[in-house]
Every structure is written in structure tokens, then in C-alpha cells.
Image (tube, rainbow, N blue to C red):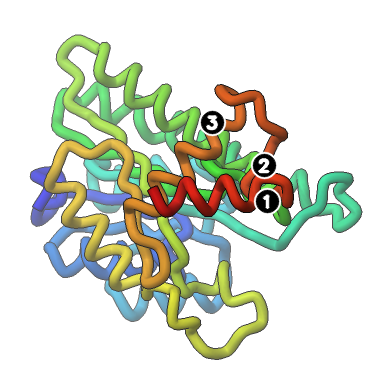
Amino acid sequence: MHPVLAKDNVAVVTGGASGIGLEIVGRLVALGMKVAIADLPGPALERAAAETGALGVAVDVTDRAALEALKVRVERELGPVSALFANAAIQPGSDVFDERGTWNRVIDVNLMGLVHTVQVLAPAMIASGAPGLIVMTGSKQGITTPPGDPAYNAAKAGVKAFAEAVQHDLRGREGCRVEARLLIPGFVWTGLTRQGRTEKPAGAWTPEQLVDFLMAALDRDDFYILCPDNDVDRATDEKRILWAAGDIVENRPPLSRWHGDYDAAFKAWLER
């Protein structure tokens, strides 16, 4: 187990009232950590706090003042933060020309909400001189950027770039004992991915499987925690990621994986 995830240490989990976040909360509480769930006000937050025994704090991560208030409350009631899981996200769907009117909210929550969460909570973690852990939840969609949800893809691509910058900065700070990781889930069965379905697809992992993988990865030095699922193994993920990068290197059309002229070439690439 990662040394920061220890009894009586304090953790904050944004988006912790459901899905992956709630599963993380449960694991941390089981380890004896003091945990704050930061999520939107409502029955889900109340239920999560009651079921896990964690401190529930109503926060909209797009509101920096609310994040500042979260920091003050957590430090007052639980103590200094050792672990931060910046996990809050939404996925209402989007289109290129924003006909659904979702772009601003998606970028505000999924990218800027995460950025502000880290900017508000990480400085005190660094200044303490104690070991610390920051896990930011990204997405494979922020790496391979498949067609269909450009706002979500753009936000998660930004999360990847920000997480890389954070870890680079932390690594270069003399005496800094805080590290960052990027969690890259595969297909996980949560409220974010249900999209009207009532039964879990066979290809999806449960949040429990995802957090099992996360906890094992935190024992290693992996920055990129690239998660498989029941349909896609790591080797396939690696080939998809390399193909996406190859669009630039090979001067192919963008998103050539979904471009009919490259179907045969992509299939051959997967079979190599």
C-alpha cells in the first residue's frame, strides 16, 4: 500500500459521492484514513457520507471560493491533507459547434475544476514537508480523442497535460515529498457511462475492479495508471495510443483510426 494511504492521514476525494470516487472513499476509510467527500449538495452526498462515515462537504468544484472553504473546513475538522483524489467530472455529451450548450460546463468542471482543486489544496501539502499524494482522474478519451464527445475529450486532454506539468514541477522542488499520478480509466460502469442503460455491459469494469487496479498501481512508481477493462487489454491500449500519435508523425488525417481509408492499415497495426 502507498505509504501516504495510512491510518489517521487525511484524504480529500472530489466527486466522491458516486462511482469511482465513492469506491475510493470506501477503500480509504477502510484503511483508517480520515476522509472528506467533496461533491455537489444533495441526497447522493448525504448518503455517501452516512454509509462511509466520511465527512461530506457540499462543493461545486467550479467555485474556487468553495474550494478554499473546503480546505479550511477539512484542516479544521480532520487535519492537514495528505492525499488528494481530484476525480469530479461530468459527461452530458457535446458536439463540435455546441448545439447542446454543454461546452462551458464540461470544461469548467472536468478541467478547470480539477485545476483549481489542485491549486487550492496542493500548496499546503507541499509546504508541510510531509509525504503527499495527488491522483488526478483523466481518461483515455483525452489521449486518443475519439469522435463523438469533443468537449469531454478536450477537457480530459487538458487534465493529462496539467497532471504531467504538476508532477514535473513537484519533482523539481527541493525537499518536496508530494507526488502526482494520472489515473486513466477504461470502460467503467458508473452513472457517468450508463447513458440510459440499466444493465452493465460485459466489457465494462466495476468501480471495485478499477480501484483494485489503482491501489496496486500506487504501490509502484507508475505515473500513468493506464487501466484495462473486460474488452481492452493493455497491449491494445498501447497500440491505439501509438496510432493516435502517429497521425502527426505520419501526417495522416486527424482521427484516422475512424477514417474509412485507414481501416485496413489500422487493423493490420493491431494485429502486428
How many other residues sit within 10 Å of disc 2, few (<14), some (14-19) or many (≥20)?
some
Foreground residue, 59 or 265? 265
Q: Which amino acid type is marked by label 1?
A: Trp
How far is mark 1 from mark 2, CA to CA?
6 Å
Residue at image position (86%, 49%) is 98
Foreground residue, 139 or 136? 139
The image shows residue 137, relative to residue 253, as above or below, that is below
Q: Which residue is mark 1?
A: 258
How far is mark 3 from mark 2, CA to CA?
10 Å
Residue 115 in percent (x, y) is at 51, 34
Task: Identify the element where label 3 is drawn.
Answer: helix
> Is the Cβ of the residue at disc 1 closer than 8 Å to that at disc 2?
yes
Task: Identify the element where label 1 is drawn.
Answer: helix
Q: Which amino acid type is marked by label 3?
A: Gly
Q: Which residue is mark 2?
A: 255
Which mark, by number, is residue 246? 3
- Mark 3 vs 2, N-terminal side: 3
Residue at image position (19%, 47%) is 218
Residue 1 in percent (x, y) is at 9, 53
| Left or right: where 49 falls relative to 115 | left
